[in-house]
Amino acid sequence: MEILGFKETEIILSKYKIPFCKTEIFNSKEKALLFAQKIGFPVVLKVHGQRVFHKSELRGVKVGIENKEDFISSWDEMIKNVSGRNIEGLLVQEMVSGSEVAIGMKRDNQFGPVIMFGLGGIFIEIIKDFSLRIAPINLEESLEMIKEIKGFKILDGARGKEKVNIKQLAQILVNLSTLSIKEEKIKSIDFNPIIINKKRALATDFRIVI
Amino acid sequence: MKNIFNPKSVALIGASEEKNSVGLGLAKNILESKKDVFFVNPFKESVLGLKCYDKITDIKSKIDLAVIAVPAKVVKETVIDCVSKKVGTVIIISGGFKEEGKEEEEEEIKNILKENNISLIGPNCLGIISKDLNASFAPITPKEGSIAFLSQSGAIINSVIDKVGFSKIVSYGNEADLGLVDFLEYLDKDKDTKVISIYIEGLKDGRKFMEVAKKISKPIVLIKAGRSEKGKKAVGTHTGSLAGDYDVYKSAMKQSGVILVDTIEELLDISKALAFLPKCKNGIGIITNGGGLGILTADYCFQYGIDIPELNKETISYLDKKLKGVKNKNNPLDVIGDAMPERYGVAMEALLNQKDINSLIVISAPQAMTDHKENAKMVVEMRKKYPQKPIVCCFKEGDLEENNVPNYPDAMRAVKSIRSLIKNEQ
């Protein structure tokens, strides 16, 4: 069991039209910095490796990097944190703002690919507020599974919160369903979080396990 | 499947007179069936007065259904005899196969039968029950009814067998050949069956089950055991199947249009409602002779998304004229503790005539003066007069279920059952 390399992940995401935030992988600090400057601060730094299943525990994630100095010191620190680990490189990502949701896929030994949707973080793990569907699912079923969670009102503009682009989110679920049916060698997928706002939904963290 | 559920002749291999044995249980039940019955047991002259043959091949008549209840180690040679005899179908009651890790032995027997185009139920099962046929070692033969019950566990069958009427009961055991989905497809076309109830611990092929269940036109009510960690572990040693993740099961059943229930009580309650009554639109009327019970029922309805329409002008003016001794005309309609059958009749008639009331829950609490039996008659009469509007009851007594009106000891159970009848709701 290993995590799919970044380039292959990128290809899969593009092929199945899973939108993701501007991301590139680097082994050179200088090149990484140029990219960060190109996409504009603030940015995120994240470690990516075949065996790196828990990035945060390794201190392999840093968000809100504001400028060049911050970037250079964050890079050096992260390289130190993951030293001795077999890594593919560090990802530089744009920062996206909005609500967080999580989408996933796992293969059940009796029903095959199962699609999961939830608000992410504690909502899934502690409050157990998530919905499941056996793939394949259509747009209607995917909308139904989004509306099924108790926390749906948070996405639907409760208490002055911004109403998010549910339709695009639903389309991502459908695309993930298609992906899971066609790419049989993929064992599980986690898009956690997907950042969603009024306009768009973007996967900002993606883990494809093969 | 005709050979299974409607055979002309049945042979029991392993008929016995030994007290408390499976062979005796089967022998008794099969003898009571309206079929040509033959017993096979090389060590006995006769069992329960019927001659025993040494081998099935010694029987001259044609055998449609062979029921095998011999020790696991001699099942294979018995099956070979059945092949020589050219029987139509075989039920292997005997256990000691896949569930005990003996997959190869099970596979071998399955293949022998398959090569000879003989279908197989089991092994490791209680048997089957159909009209005029009890080829099981269940303690009794159940009443006839329109609920079909498919169960991975034999003991679960025994625990419900006296509770309602059944069209068919199948204990499908290890599913070496015929399995749950084959019976689902058959029962969908079976004219005696209106609803299919299922007890499972695991599914052999979840995707295949979903594909078939989606196509079944009759309602399916299902209970899944092995939801907790301890329960799952027990499934492994009971039927040798994989219990799986219950959250995934919940989604799969929802997607397949299967009504998933938590308890055996609910399984029977809902199956009964679906077997006795037509489907209906949302909107319910509640009639009670006790205010408290009416309020609780209204709360339960709210909890399950069942609408309780206000009574309209026509209904109220009809009640003003005809319903004597009752001041408040609301839904729930409290006909007061001293209600006699006539008052129930008027109330039911009034509510059933209101367009947006599509079903009724009628409660007859045991007040000192209540005449449950007459109230029940009134309900049965209304069922006949308004066949499209289902009625369920909470009565202490009365001939209700005999007349296809479900009667529940608790209002919550009545509400859950009505909910299963409402179209586009589960």
Image (tube, helix red, strand yellow):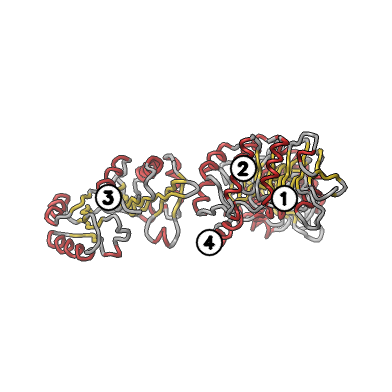
Q: Is residue A111 visible?
A: yes
Mark in the foreground, 1 or 4: 1
- Relative side of B127 to A67, left or right: right
Q: Which residue is mark 2?
A: B110
Identity of the residue drawn at 65% across and 46% down: B122
Quadrant where the N terminus of chain B is found in the figure: top right
Q: State the separation of the CA atoms marked 1 and 4.
A: 34 Å
Badge 3 marks a residue whose secondary structure is loop
| Residue B229 image label | 4
The type of residue carrying mark 3 is Gly
**Percent x, y of residue B49:** 88, 47
Residue B251 left/right relative to A157: right
Chain letter of the residue carrying label 1: B
Task: Write down the quadrant of residue B413 in the picture.
Answer: bottom right
Say above or below: A72 vs B91: below
Q: CA distance from mark 3 to mark 2?
A: 46 Å
